[in-house]
Image: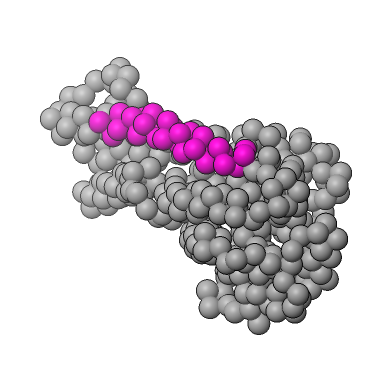
Amino acid sequence: MLLMKLLVFSLGVLIVVWVMATAVRTFILPRGENAFLSRQVFRGLRVVFLLVARQARTFEQQDRILAYYSPVVLLALPFTYLFCVLIGFTCINWAIGVDSLYDALLLSGSSLLTLGFAPVHTMPMMIVSFIDSAIGLILVAVLIAYLPVIYSEFSSREKLVSMLDVNANTPPSPVEFILRVHRNRDDFDYMRGIFAQWEAWFVEVEETHTSLVALVFLRSQVPERNWLTAAGVVLDTAALVQSTIDTPNQIEASFCLRAGYLSLRRIATFFNIPYNASATREDDISITRVEYDEVYDRLLAAGVPLKPDREQAWLDYKGWRVNYDRPLLGIARIITAPYAMWVSDRAFPDMQGLMGL
């Protein structure tokens, strides 16, 4: 019997320590850590939400359902942690002398939720009860502190995403982005400042979307707008400017591209999305030569100055796109991104029909 209680006590301690380590890795540690318990909560609820969302007849209905996914996960995580801690301290209470599992569970819940209706009779029970109460308060306090940070970063992220509607239409398109600049300014130097802004945006997204994972799934206020499709459109625009548009080299576009694909790669790595870090322009990408030629012809017909060597321009574009192609599409599948040219139109081939496009 003594051995049994020792084993149960050890199990309870391990559960509590494991949960607290998970909470630290998920909420406090300022780096991307893939904690098993948190990952299972994300995965389990994602399956439920996707099953419900598939019943939607329009993308707007689907988006409305999926918009609740991340907030529900944020509420489910602390409840999951508290439940596991409850089980852990139930084991500990029984092992240190509480008569029955029912009484051990009652004492654990009373202490964890700071209700105080279960009496304690011995010094070990009192010490365990104090520790139980302290952990419950810590978990609740962490959640209260965590939510404002999440929504502050969300608001910061959405500013440039919203501004992209002005530059690239809704749904956004790199072609429309370039055509609007050409029609209204006829000077692609204007885009230098835009690319510099997005370079800083990518750097911030890389940090926040791996340390605050719920941000990845938080959807924009408008169904057709999304942080990932905005990122893809900006990267494709920068890649076209550097490879296809006959304009002086824009180092801002190059830096934006590098910041962008490094950001998407790190997020893809966090979610175990495969990609080739050593890919070259000789490797295949999801964009076909026919699609590229259609864009080239459309820009040419609009009077946009293009580099005359179309073959070289295509190879240069591939050389940029190959760096972020697989991470971009992989993340688009995970978050069920809305339709956008050269992003979710190939991550989800049926997305155009769902959106009526």
Would residue 190 be seen by someone viewing this image from the given angle?
yes
The structure residue drawn at horizontal position 68% and vertical position 44%, both measured from the top left corner, is 167
The structure residue drawn at horizontal position 21% and vertical position 24%, both measured from the top left corner, is 120
Give the left or right position of residue 108, taking residue 249 as reference: left
Would you identify the image quadrant in which residue 56 lies?
Answer: top right
Camera-side residue of 67 and 250: 250
Magenta region:
134-163
x and y percentages locating residue 349 in the rendered image? 80, 58
Would you identify the image quadrant in which residue 127 lies?
Answer: top left
Q: Is residue 203 above or below residue 258?
A: above
Query: Magenta span: helix, strand or loop, mainly?
Result: helix
x and y percentages locating residue 281 in the rendered image? 63, 78
How many numbered tags mark residues here? 0
Q: Is residue 295 above or below residue 73?
A: below
x and y percentages locating residue 180 in the rendered image? 73, 48
Give the left or right position of residue 297, taking residue 330 as reference: right
The structure residue drawn at horizontal position 33% and vertical position 48%, both measured from the top left corner, is 29
Would residue 328 be seen by someone viewing this image from the given angle?
no
Q: Is residue 279 above or below residue 162?
A: below
Camera-side residue of 143 and 48: 143
Identify the residue at the far top of this view. Answer: 117
x and y percentages locating residue 164 in the rendered image? 64, 43
Identify the residue at the far bottom of this view. Answer: 282
Give the left or right position of residue 270, taking residue 273 as reference: left
The structure residue drawn at horizontal position 86% and vertical position 44%, both measured from the top left corner, is 356
Q: Is residue 162 magenta-colored? A: yes
Camera-side residue of 199 and 194: 194
Camera-side residue of 151 and 122: 151
